[in-house]
Image (spheres, coloured by chain):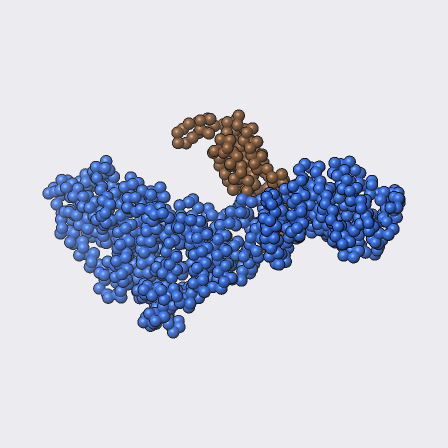
Amino acid sequence: MKKIEAIIKPFKLDEVKEQLHSKGITGMTITEVKGFGRQKGHREIYRGAEYTVDLIPKIKLEIVVAADMIDTVVDVIMKAARTGKIGDGKIFILPLEEVIRIRTGESGKEAI
Amino acid sequence: MYMAMNFTSGRMITGAAQSESLTQRIDEEIKSLFYEHFGDRLPGCTLIALGGYGRRDLCPYSDLDLLLLVERRTTRKEITAAIEDILYPLWDKGFNASYSVRTVKETLHDAKDDFFFRTSLIDARYICGSDLLATKLTHVLEKKISLRNTRKFVSDLLSHTHKRHAKFGDTSYILEPDLKEGHGGLRDYQTVMWAMKVISQTKNKLPDLITPMDIHELGVAHDFILKIRYLLHEISGRKNDRMYLEFQEVLAKEMVFSGSDVETSVETFMKQFHRQALTIKSITDSFLFSLAHTLNLTKSPADRVIDEHFKLTAGQLTFTNPGEVRRSPYLIMRAFEHLAAGDYTFSPSARFLIRKSFDLAEDLRNSSQAHETFLRILSMKKSAKILTCMLETGLLELFIPEFEKIKGRTIFDLYHTYTVDLHSIQTVAELNALEESEPEIFSRVNDRNALYLSAFLHDIGKGYGLKHEIVGADIAGSISTRFDLSGDSVDLVRFLIHNHIVMADLATKLDLTEERVAVEFARKMKDPQRLSMLYLLTVADSKATGPLGWNEWKEALLSELYAKALHVMEKGIFKDPANTQLLERKWEQLMREIARKPGHRHARPLWALPQAYILYSDTPDIIRHMDLRSRIDGPEDIEVDVTLKDKHVTLTIITRDRPGLFSMLTGILAMNHLEIISAKVFTWLDGVAVDVFKVIPPWPDFSEWHKITAQFKKATTGNMDIRARLASTKALKNNDQNAPNATQKASITIDNETSDFFTLVEIRAQNSLGMLYHVSRTITGFGLDIHRAFVSRNGDLGSNVFYVVDALGEKIEDEQRRLKLSADIQRVIDDSWKREENPLHDGGQEIPAP
């Protein structure tokens, strides 16, 4: 089992969600986050004054899947979240020790 | 076990009857247990019911507070054992029964120090045992009541009530209200009853603090909520006073509420519930205020005359001449305005007068003075408090009947914390706060009335089963017309309400780094005032929705959309306000033209046309370009169109955009001695570049257009060394491009301010052969893409503006890079002049004269 964390642009959320859904991925955790990577603070003219926006709003997706689904999920996110411009985000893949469904106590793949 | 008690919550009986019946059954049970365990064995004991049990307000799983009065303390040990024998069966039945054993003297002593014990004693009720002791207690308690300890009691009562309200929140608005402890809940009713009971026992004569009408309404509301509490305990299977969303549907069914086309049964039920809680809340507040004042517990401002119609008595606003209200109903609205201006409340008589004057509602609705006053109130600092007060007295829905629909309405989603009526008022309050914190944005708003009215009415369309922003715009439109707002203001209100959910939605759903997003939005908003108003309304609405509706994340996106659209209006294509209308006309023309064309074959790429392109191109040209574009497919396809008109020739080149396209085209034009008078370059949103050049041919009967077209095609496939060809091209002697004046240096500006999306490279320089080629080649050499360009010539001086971005679509943020670009462009311009002065400088060779 793996956990995928993807940082994407906010307006890409619907598309990514839809595409994942079509591949049978229905469960995920979505968080509104702020941060920066290579797309460092960009400067904006706001209310007449120039200021640096150093934390950019993004969406973080967390998805847990069986290891054999990784390629599919990564591929779907890559395609759906890409604009080709800076700040498209990143995908992190983390090893996962165990998943337990609280209601039933099921664990492992059954609990995903 | 609980079922054994067999609580039957008959649907049609009142809350009081329901609780009464349960109380009786418990009484019977306790009595029989009492005789069994006390009987003759332990004489001189009396069992007294306290608190809710004493009041006969019992619900399943309620607390049962018992007081065992004894003659003396000595027999206590035996008594304790006996009373526990009474309690165990009650515990088994799910009641949280508790007891205390006291003598009359002890009871009196404890009541002095323990406020809660004292309140529970107010509701004390004899159940069984020695009635002698019970009478003694009553007698002693009554004897002890004096005005002095009444004041102390009321003062404690008020302070505990304030603390309780702060802790449990406002039952009349909260979506998961606490039926017992919340503001507007059952405890408020009891508070009023306790105070009235205690006051009535004082020997001193006190003025009337509450009207019979209020007492009646209070009783009805209390009964309704008591009944719900009974059911809620039953459904929860425990003592639970919080009406969680999951229980509301069942309760609505049990309370026999049915839905309608536009409202579910639970919505109707909760609306009714919130109204009843509101009644308790407002009557309680008014009563407690009067009470505190009457007993001199609060410091009130000195009595004074406010104006000819109003005076301040005992810190409360009163009508000077109550009879006047019937002649001039608008005075009611003025009374509210005075409340907002000072920190007053209505006197009980003023409050009663207002509620009694509801038959004047129609006069009030038609009074322009009332309308003006209401609009003034809306934008006053304390407007939220006043609007809430209007809501509570019932005036609001009489003055604006459309408001009735959203009064107490619950929205069943995750975001909203308050009912729609209070949310509307809260939105006005948030707008008030924004006026303080965002003076700059507010300075763009001229029509404050329209903005405040929109904030107040933005959800007025809820509950009709249709899109509320559309219904709401219509309703608010007719309200503003009734308020006699100008046509422009009515339009603004309609516009704002119609769009009040759009902006927050677009801010998260669209790519804000795209110029077209900001331009489209600016176009829809039309002017900075409307944009700023919608932004303020959106922020106020989101903030008033609750903590889930607003956070820094959402604010960042929303303010980015606002700032960028505003920037487009102030520095971009809508800088000239006339452009907004011009653009709309152009679109209309274009749509008409297209509709005339057979087969609508141009419909396809309309989405791809940038607004700036539409604005700066003639409609017939746009149609022509779309024709040409339809023949473009692969990257090597190129369409060239030559039109001769007067002395000028217009060359239109359409192909897929690619780095270096503009320098390739200008290079070939220079090779052929075509003098560029103007050029417009646009990149369509489907990635196709449209380059339109106006050129002067080198000699009058120049006819080598086919050759040039062939060169374009050849260059597109990469089979031409333009640089080498151009180096060997020499200026024509008869060419009217004069040798540059060495004293005039080119001026180059790299501008990051004008656009949020592009760096603007602006060059003013004297023209020379191939200069555009060299300049654009330098730009491309920096890894920049020319997205848009405007070239024009005025006499010898050329003005060139390039909109550029880097390979990642970003502006040139690094200042060093901007300086280097500027210096490099300066150098190639200088070089191109030198080449012209000395054709052989670049190793070029003369070409044969034509």
Chain B palette colour: blue
Q: Position of residue B747 (x, y in %)?
A: 76, 54
Closest to the observer, B641 or B820: B641
Query: Which quadrant of the structure image shows residue B607?
Result: top right
B677 is higher (above) or lower (below) than B324: above
Q: Position of residue B304 (x, y in %)?
A: 37, 72
Q: Position of residue A48 (x, y in %)?
A: 61, 56
Q: Is residue B815 visible?
A: no
Residue at image location 58% in from the left, 44% down from the top = B511
Closest to the observer, B537 or B285: B537
Farthest bottom residue? B308
B618 is higher (above) or lower (below) than A8: below
Residue at image location 22% in from the left, 64% down from the top = B203
Residue at image location 55% in from the left, 58% down from the top = B529
Q: Position of residue B323 (x, y in %)?
A: 32, 71
Farthest left residue? B40
Instruction: From the viewer's perspective, tell me whether residue B817 is left or right of residue B590.
Output: right
- Looking at the rendered image, the quarter that the N terminus of chain B falls into is top left
Residue at image location 23% in from the left, 43% down from the top = B9
Closest to the observer, A109 or B24: A109
Instruction: From the viewer's perspective, tell me whether residue A39 is left or right of residue B209.
Output: right
